[in-house]
Amino acid sequence: MNNSVQIKILASALAANVFLQEEREKIIRWLANQPGVKEIVKGLGNSKLIRESNLVCKTYNLELPKLEESGNKVFYANEEIGEKRILYKSPLPGELQARLSYESIADRFLEYLQKVHHVVVLNESNFHVQIFIPGTKKIDFTQEWKEFITGVAFSTDGNSKYKLPGLKHTLIQMLNSITLAGRGFSTVEVPIITKEQSNVLAAWYFAVVKQVEKRQLDREKSIDYINKQINNLKERLEKEKLEAKEIKQIKKDRAKYEKDFKSKQEMQAKEAKKYHEYFLKGLNKILEEHGKIFQDINNIEDKLKSDALKRSQINQLQKQKDKLKSKLIFSEESVKHKQNLLQQSQGDPFKFVNLDLENNSQLQIIKAISKPFTKTATDQINSTRGDIFTQCILEMYRLIESEKLTDSIPEPLFTEQPHIKGLRSAGDDGKDFCYSCGVALNSKNAKWKVARFMFERPSQRRQSSNSEDRPFICSSCSILAFASPLKVTDESIILQLKSKSNNTESQDKLKDYLRMLTNKELHLSSGRYVILTSDKTSNGVIASQKLGQIQYALLKTASIFPLEVLEDFKFNLILQGNQSKELSSRYLILLKGLMEAYGQKIIASGDINLKLGDAVRYVEQDSPYLAEYTIVRVSKISNPLEMERVRRKYWRLLQQDMSVNSKRAKLYQDVAALIGITYPFVDYAEYLIKKHQEERESKKETKSSPEDLKKEVAREISKIIENSDELQKFCYYSCLGNENRFQITATLKRNRNTHFIYDQARKLLLEELKIADLKEKSKDGELSITLSLGDVEKVYFYFANDPEYSNDQGWNELTYNLKISLYTRFPELVRKLNKKGDK
C-alpha cells in the first residue's frame, strides 16, 4: 500500500472517529509530516479534524503500525478501521454536453460521499472508482444517490453545512452568466423530480414576468419624461421672448421629442395589447377546458352512484374519470380563484399576478426564490412574444400548484455491479432508445426530446432518418443535462483541469482552488470542469468570437489563474464536436507575464484588445520575443522584474516539452545569451549619452527642451539596437559618448531584472566559449561579469560559425529576435507616445 493511499485511509478514519483518543493524537502527529494532508482533511468536511491538524506540532521520525489488508477489510494495529469497495461507472453519453453533465454530477456525488460519510477515492479509471469506507457501517449507495439528488443537486440551496451547491449555485448562476440562445426560447420541457426543482423553475418564470412588467413601467416613465420636455419647450415658445435662432433650435428639439414620444407610445400600446390579448385568450381557454372536465367528472361520479352498473361498466367509467383527471392542471378551487382574479384585473397579466401575490403564500415563496435571477437569465426566455409570455405565467402556476412529480430520479451513476446495457436494433432514429446514452425506451411512453438545455445542437439529422428533428432521450439524460451548469455555447469556454503530478496533494488543491475561483469570479465550476464566460465589449461583441475560441481561452485562462496553478495543472479546452485541445502551460505562463507585466486586458477602453490577439498567435507560433515586442509597443507600463521571472519559467517548460521544435528552443536560448552580452553595452551607452547631454545643458551649450533631449537620447540608443545585426556597426555605435572609444567595457550584473539573461550569457561565455580573461565576480551577494567589445566579437563569430545561423536566413532570424528583444528592455523607445512623431 503506497503512502498516498495510506494517508487517505487514515485521514478518512480520523474524520469518522474510528480511533481511540490516544491513537488518534499519534496518527494526527504522523499525518502532520505528510505532504498534501491539509487539502485532504479540508475535503472530508470534519471541522474538528481540521482544527486538530492545524494545531499539532510536527514530530519527526514518528513511526506507525503499517496498515494491513484482509480481503476488502483494512486493519490498523489488528483493529478493523474500514473496507475498500469498487464502484462501477455508468457509460458516458456520446454527445458533448450530455457527457459533461454526467461527468460533473458524478464528481459532485463523490464529493458528497467524501464530506457527508468521509468516504475517500483511492484510485480511479474511466470505468470504476476504488473507495475506502471508514468504520463498520454499511452504506447503501442507491439510497445515498437518492439523498444526493433530492437533497443537494436538485434542491434550491444545496447543503450549506458541507458547502455542496444546489440549483441556486448551479442552474441559476449558469442562467445569469451565459446566453444559451441569442433569440431566446420558450418555457422548458424537462422532467420534474423534486418540488424544489419545480419551485426554482416557477421562480424563473416569475422573474421573466416581472422583467417584462419593469420594461413596460420604464417605458411609461420615459414617455412621461418626454411629454414633460415637450410641454416645457412649448411653454418657452409661448411665454419667452426668443431670437429666431433659439426658436429654430427649440422647434427642432420639440420635433425630435415628439417623434420619440409617438414611437414609444405606439410601442407601449402595442405591447400592452399583445400581452393582454394573449393572456386573456390563453387563460380563458384553460379555465373553460377545466370547467368542462370538472363537469364531465361530476357526470361520471353521478353515474357511478347507480347500483345497476356491472363491474365492467364501473371499470370503464373509472378509466374515463382517471383519464379526465390526468388532463387537469389546476384544482376546482384554483380555477374559481383565477376566474375572480381575471375579472378583478380585467385581463391585465401584471395586475393578475400582483393581486394574487397579496394572499398566495406559495407565490410569495416563489418571489423570494426569484431574487437571484438577473436580466441575463430572464432574457433567455423570448418574452417579447405574447404566446411565450403567457406560457410563462401558465407554466409558473402549473409548477406551483402541481404536487405530482413527472418522473423518478435518474438512475445511479455508480453501482456495485457493472452496468450492462441491453441489445437493440441498428440505426440512430427511433423512439425505442435514448439518443444520448442508448438505454432502451418504451416507444409508447417516450416523451422527452432533446432541447437547447441538454444538447448544444438540439435538432439532429440522423443517418437513419430523412429529415432533421429533435430525437428522443431518456429522463435521466434529460434531467442531468438540464441541471448541469456546463453548457456549450458561443459565449462559454469550458476547461477541464487535471493535475500534472496526479498526486493527492495536487488533486485536492485543484478542488479548493476551483471553489475559491468560482466564489470570487463570475464563473461556474462542476467537478473538475470550470466554465468561463466570454468577455463582451460595450457594443455586445463577444471576445471569443473576435479573437478565436482557442486564442481567447489561452488569454482568459492566463488572466484568471495564478502562475503556480498554470504550472501545476493541465488545461484542456473542450471544443464543440466532442473534442478537446490542451492549452500549453508555457503559452499560458508567457501570456500571464505579458498581461500582468505590461498591464494588458482582453477588453481595453471598451474594445477588444487586438494587439493582445496578435501576441497570442505569435506565442502559439513559438515566437515569444515577437509577442513581447508587439505588447511593448502599445503598453504604457512595464514590470521588468515580473517579465524576467516569467522568461525563466517559460524557458524551463520549453526545455521539458518534447513536442517543441529543437530549433525554436535553441533560438530562444541563443537570443537570451546574446541579449545578456549586448544589453550591458546598450545600457551603458544610454548612461553615457544622458550624462553628456546633461553636461551640455549645465554649460548652456544647447537650447533644446527636455523633451527634445529625451528624443535625441532615444535616437542614439535606437541606432545601437538597429545595428546589432552587424558586429562592426554595433561596436561603433556602442562607443558613442566614450572618450576611449574602443577601450569601452560594460558590466553585466545578475539582479532581479537580468537573472535569466545573465545565466544564459554566463553559460555561453564561461562554459561554451571558455574565455580565459573573463572572471565572474561577487560583490554584496551580487554576481557580475565585466565584458569588452572583444568578448562581443568572439560571441558574434561563434554564432556566425554555428550551422543554424551560417546562412542569411538563420542569421537574420537570430539578429531580428535580438533587436526586438533589446527594444523590450528599453520600452520607451518603441511605445506609441501621445504626441505625433514621438518614437
Image: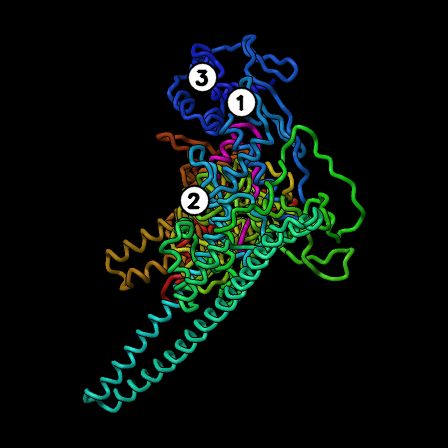
Mark number, residue 680:
2
The outermost residue toward the bottom is 244
- Mark nearer the N terminus (3 vs 2): 3
Residue at disc 1, secondary structure = helix
Task: Characterize the local packing of mark 2: few (<14), some (14-19) or many (20 or more) Cα atoms within 10 angstroms.
Answer: some
Eyeballing the image, is 446 above or below 219?
above
Q: CA distance from mark 1 to mark 2?
A: 54 Å
Residue in the foreground of this view, choosing between 614 and 107: 107
Q: Quadrant of the C terminus?
A: bottom left
Q: CA distance from mark 3 to mark 2?
A: 55 Å
* Residue at the image position 30 percent from the left and 87 percent from the top: 251
Asked if the residue at tag 2 contacts the one at tag 3, i.e. Cβ–Cβ closer than 8 Å, the answer is: no
Q: Amino acid at mark 3?
A: Ile
Mark number, residue 21:
none
Left or right? Give the position of 454 relative to 513: right
Residue in the foreground of this view, choosing between 837 and 81: 81
Give the label, 1 or 2, closer to the camera.
1
Residue 532 position, x and y percent, is 51, 49
Residue highlighted by disc 3: 28
Residue 629 position, x and y percent, is 49, 53
- Mark nearer the N terminus (3 vs 1): 1
